[in-house]
Image: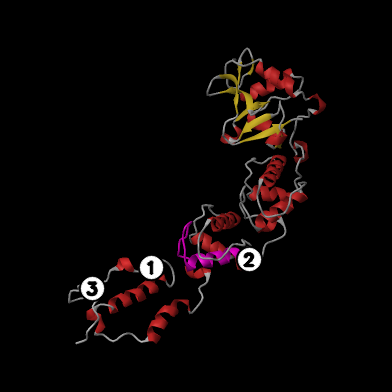
Amino acid sequence: MFRTASRGTHRATGRAVIDYRGLAVPVGKGVGGVAVLGAVTATGALQSAPSAQAAPAPAASTVRSAVTAPVAAPATSSSYSSVKLRLGARGDAVTSLQRSLNDQGAGISADGVFGSKTLRAVKSAQSSAGITVDGVVGPQTWAALNGSEKKGGSSSSSAGSSSSLLRQGSRGSAVRTLQSSLNEAGANLKVDGVFGRGTASAVRSLQSAAGLRVDTVVGPKTWSALDRGVRIGSTGSDRGTSRDEVGSSFDGQAIVSAARAQIGVGYKWGGSSPSTGFDCSGLVYHAYNQAGIDLSRKTAKGYTFGGRIISQSEAKVGDLVAFTGNDYGHIGIYAGNGTIIDASGSRQRVMERSIWSAPHVFVTYR
């Protein structure tokens, strides 16, 4: 019988009981060698029990091979194509993800921790690949990353990136291609691969010039406009559609005064005079013509694309504010200080109010 030194505790005879609460790492969690570490720690716990001491200890070489086996062959990103990762994940799969992102120019630390920088890089890669931008790395994202080396690098032309869906916040080589193409179209952007405010403004201007939906999302139609050579700031006539020419007759304050004079008048769909009531585009038509601007009668969408899309910082009193929902279904006259005068369908009257949070663009006829 083997004798052991007393530890001041009573240990019952019989089967050894493992207290997993004392393990350094939970068994079965993590990626790669973590489960092995738990198994080795559990082996040590078993050997400390009296019933386990009678069994011969495993050879050192066996323990070493158990510990080192998982890292004997470096894993590639394709090895983790079935692993789903998100913010807060840790382990070898995250390290592999970070290395793949760095291959695309992310420039993040491959530390195995899925933090905020890794999240931003993932979203940028998803945007560049034209897949759902949710920051969760699943089969689609792994496939996009694993296939990046087979594409032969990025094209210098917008045609080479025509499958990339980009929006504000996107980063990477596809954004650099977009910025270069926008500069060729008349923009003046820093080609830094970051889709910020300047790039967004240039995209809106291009979409307006091309007669596209002005949503700042760069998809196939916007890429096609760049490939066709559409110029930023071009008028409607440049693209084969009519545009009202206002020139020096534009008087923003007179437009606002004419619109204010109609506050309280009832709403009527299709109406464009005080006697019948106004809808949103009818109020624009009335106020502009009262201010001496011979503007033809159009819908809200027609006024949006008949003018020129500008940034908020460029907007002046008398310009228009077009709300993009319902296919540019509402428009108002900018009165300055974040307010508009519009014929409200929901309030059933002409009113002056603050611009609300719905997506909108500014339009000018100056």
Neighbour tally class for label 1: few under 14, some 14-19, many 20 plus, Cα within 10 Å: some
Q: Secondary structure at mark 1?
A: loop
Tell me the CA gap for discs 1 and 2.
Answer: 40 Å
The residue under the point 47% across, 63% down is: 90
Question: Where does the magenta region start and end?
Answer: 81-102
Dot 3 and dot 2 residues touching (CB under 8 Å): no
Badge 1 is on which residue?
25
Tell me the CA gap for discs 3 and 1.
Answer: 27 Å
Dot 1 and dot 2 residues touching (CB under 8 Å): no
x%, y% of residue 168? 62, 47
x%, y% of residue 158? 70, 55
Badge 3 is on which residue?
8
* Magenta-span inclusion, residue 91: yes
Residue 44 sits above or below residue 259 on the image: below
**What kind of residue is marked 1?**
Val
Residue 68 sits above or below residue 184 on the image: below
Q: Quadrant of residue 284?
A: top right
x%, y% of residue 159? 69, 56
Badge 2 is on which residue?
151
Tell me the CA gap for discs 3 and 2.
Answer: 67 Å
**What kind of residue is marked 2?**
Lys
User: Considering only order in the chain, which callout, 2 or 1, is on the residue closer to the N terminus?
Assistant: 1
The residue under the point 70% across, 28% down is: 319
